[in-house]
Image (cartoon, rainbow, N blue to C red):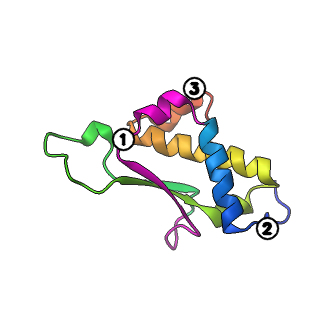
Amino acid sequence: MGGVPVEMSRERFEELVGDALDEVPEELLALMSNVVILVEEDPPPGEDLLGLYEGHALTERGWDYAGVLPDRILIYRNPILRICDGDEDVVDEVAVTVVHEIAHHFGIDDARLHELGWG
């Protein structure tokens, strides 16, 4: 891949994030509780990430899990635009990133995701 990063407004990117969420399997979205999806421009300095899950995986939530802020899935706009060639690419990449982050939320590792076809 390569070429010029996609030029895209934040508004358009957020629309595509919405489109990407439509591609995420219903059964995964239905399982997400207390999670918000946010768009950030860039990951923390020194991190090479497309997305990040912040919060408590369901497998780690104990009896004392209550009244906490929602977990967050962060989608990083600039790194995704750098590896994409157009709107459809962005939708695909965001969908895969969101699925990966949701999977981490449920304690599913990357190897299992590959088996499920979400490389």
Mark with earlier residue (1, 2): 2
Image position of 41 with respect to 50: above or below: below
How far across and down, in percent of the image, does residue 32 sit?
A: 41, 39
Q: Dot 1 surroundings within 10 Å: few (below 14), some, or many (20 or more)?
A: few
Mark with earlier residue (1, 3): 1
Question: Residue, x 24% and y 54% (percent of image)?
Answer: 68
Q: Is 101 positioned to the left or the right of 96 in the image?
A: left
Q: Could you say which quadrant of the image residue 49 lies in?
A: bottom right
Q: Secondary structure at mark 3?
A: loop
Residue 25 lies in the magenta-colored region: yes
Report which residue position mark 3 lands on.
116
Cα separation between marks 1 and 2: 33 Å
The residue stretch that appears in magenta: 24-47
Q: Are marks 1 and 3 in contact (CB under 8 Å)?
A: no
- Asked whether the viewer can see residue 119, the reply is no
Residue 72 lies in the magenta-colored region: no
Outermost residue toward the right? 3
Q: Secondary structure at mark 1?
A: loop
Report which residue position mark 2 lands on.
7
Outermost residue toward the left? 64
Question: Residue, x 40% and y 48% (percent of image)?
Answer: 35
Report which residue position mark 1 lands on.
33
Q: Dot 3 surroundings within 10 Å: few (below 14), some, or many (20 or more)?
A: few
